[in-house]
Image (cartoon, rainbow, N blue to C red):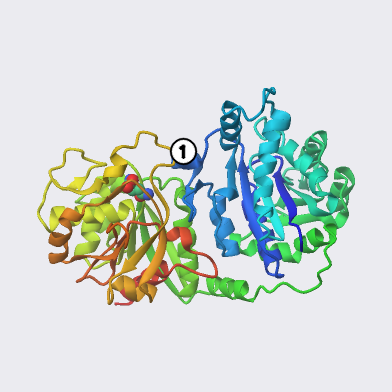
Amino acid sequence: MATAKYIFVTGGVTSSLGKGIISASLGKLLQARGFNVTIQKFDPYINIDPGTLNPYEHGECFVTDDGAETDLDLGHYERFLNSPTSQANNVTTGRIYNNVITKERKGEYLGKTVQVVPHITDEIKKNIFQLGETGKFDFVITEIGGCVGDIESLPFIEAVRQVKWDVGTNNFLVIHLTLIPYLSAAKELKTKPTQHSVKQLLEAGIQPDILVCRSEHHLPLEIRKKLALFCNVHINSVIEALDAETIYDVPILMRKEKLAERVLAKLKINHKEEPDLEQWKSFLGKLKNPTDEVEIGLVGKYVELPDAYKSIVESFIHAGAANECKVNIHWISSETINEKNTKTILGNLDGVLVAPGFGERGIQGKIEAIKYVRENNIPFFGICLGMQCAVVEFARNVLHLSKASSTEIDQKSPDPVIDLMEDQKKVTNMGGTMRLGAYPCKLKKGSKANGVYGKLNISERHRHRYEFNNKYLEKMEKAGLKATGINPETGLVEIIELDNHPWFIGTQFHPELKSTVLNPHPLFVKFVEAAIIKKKS
Ligand code: GLN
């Protein structure tokens, strides 16, 4: 196809209906028919990006190869489509305004009054089109965050209305995701909230082409007819989206409901071939028919909100399926762990992952947990702060540097085994200034890490300020903690591992950001394998 087709996904009635998963599933179904697809998300909040947001506010911050700190839905897009996203795939109101105000200060508006329409909406449209204009994609799916009717999303909705006139009706389509609640007292599914949210879209000048209806019950024909009539769509464009056992079922459910067929028909694309979902189905088959089961402890400080560790949880799902093994995650708040209760809390686990994080809270518990699994040969996987804690633990308990620490925790530590690099010491702005995005890493030949990856040169994504302090490298290595992954350009330590332990690996980078359904991350796959071995021993 010459030009990209633009598909917008809006939400109505309530948030959390799963626009991200519906967008990713539609993307998957189009990709499975041989089309090139990208998905972007527009977030209506004023932050320039979610990088400075507390995980409790926003869940995980997903980092792309180009170092953008983005919404966690981008993780779903990558995991479903198996292709990388970038800064262009996530734009916030804050970024739009920032761009417009920067231009205004430069005098680029030539004395004009700068207004929401057309200047903000033009900037939004520029960001909508930039992926399509690369010529790489047949479809650009744009998810509009929030719900229609929210004050914040109005400029985005207005921009979507205008796009129809810019690209023409054959290249433009709106899918509205909505909720059909079931009133148990009346034993009835209710369409009124959907009618109202479609009315709100109509007030903004947008007629949705397709309704995707989240529901706990099947939509009977009568309900579909009613929705079609009142919302002004074809009955075949009323798509049922039942609650699914796993998010990875949703492409299959949408396939049954013919979502992609409707999209192709509406956009007048003649494409009769069946989608190729063989690999996807084989993944689902393994996921749902495990032959093993392991217990993994996830030690972190945001455990009340699993969304804070979204990509880690999904990576375990991918790795579990690869091993045909059910991975049961035990959420362990690091603040509850102390030297007396480690055995009770961790003793029966087959593996322990110590999670990424920021700040001092919960650090001591992480260190105690690591000491226990190191001494008791329980497979250990430390990610970012988890790796840094493993270095501190080793320094304190094996090298006997009792005050060793990270300078993030103790600025006055006499043994700052984890420390800020010179360039980070000058940083005063907190947004977008960490070591972010993809960096190369060279593995030591014959190391565990080398065995895991099966190659020597890798690239992984980062999001942190502090680093392994190379002044301590020699001492650590002599005592058995080896640096087996090194950044070839800077000499920074990216991976540590223990010699005399069945599986003890810490990574300064975030492998969870690169695990997808079709490419489960080898570190997670091998960690789960190590847990299976531990369980059987
Ligand atoms: N807080 C640590 C740092 O900034 C680790 C960050 C993380 O775990 N993502 O270096």
Q: Residue at x 14, y 47 (%)?
A: 415
x and y, in percent, of residue 155 in the image:
70, 34
- The front one of 164 and 80 is 164
Tell whether 163 sits left or right of 415: right
Asked whether mark 1 and ligand 1 are closer than 8 Å, the reply comes as: no
**Quadrant placement of the C terminus:** bottom left
x and y, in percent, of residue 367 in the image:
24, 52
320 is higher (above) or lower (below) than 358: below
* Quarter where residue 431 is shown: top left
x and y, in percent, of residue 432 in the image:
44, 42
x and y, in percent, of residue 453 in the image:
38, 73
Mark 1: secondary structure: loop
Q: Amino acid at mark 1?
A: Leu
Residue 350 visible? The answer is no
Q: How many numbered marks, from 0 up?
A: 1
* Quarter where residue 22 is shown: bottom right
Direction left: furthest residue: 400
- Other-residue count near label 1 (Cα within 10 Å), few / some / many at <14 / 14–19 / ≥20: some
Q: Which residue is mark 1?
A: 53
**Quadrant placement of the N terminus:** bottom right
132 is higher (above) or lower (below) than 273: above
Tell whether 279 sits left or right of 486: right
Q: Residue at x 63, y 55 (%)?
A: 21
Residue 129 visible? The answer is yes
Q: Residue at x 22, y 55 (%)?
A: 391
Q: Residue at x 45, y 64 (%)?
A: 316
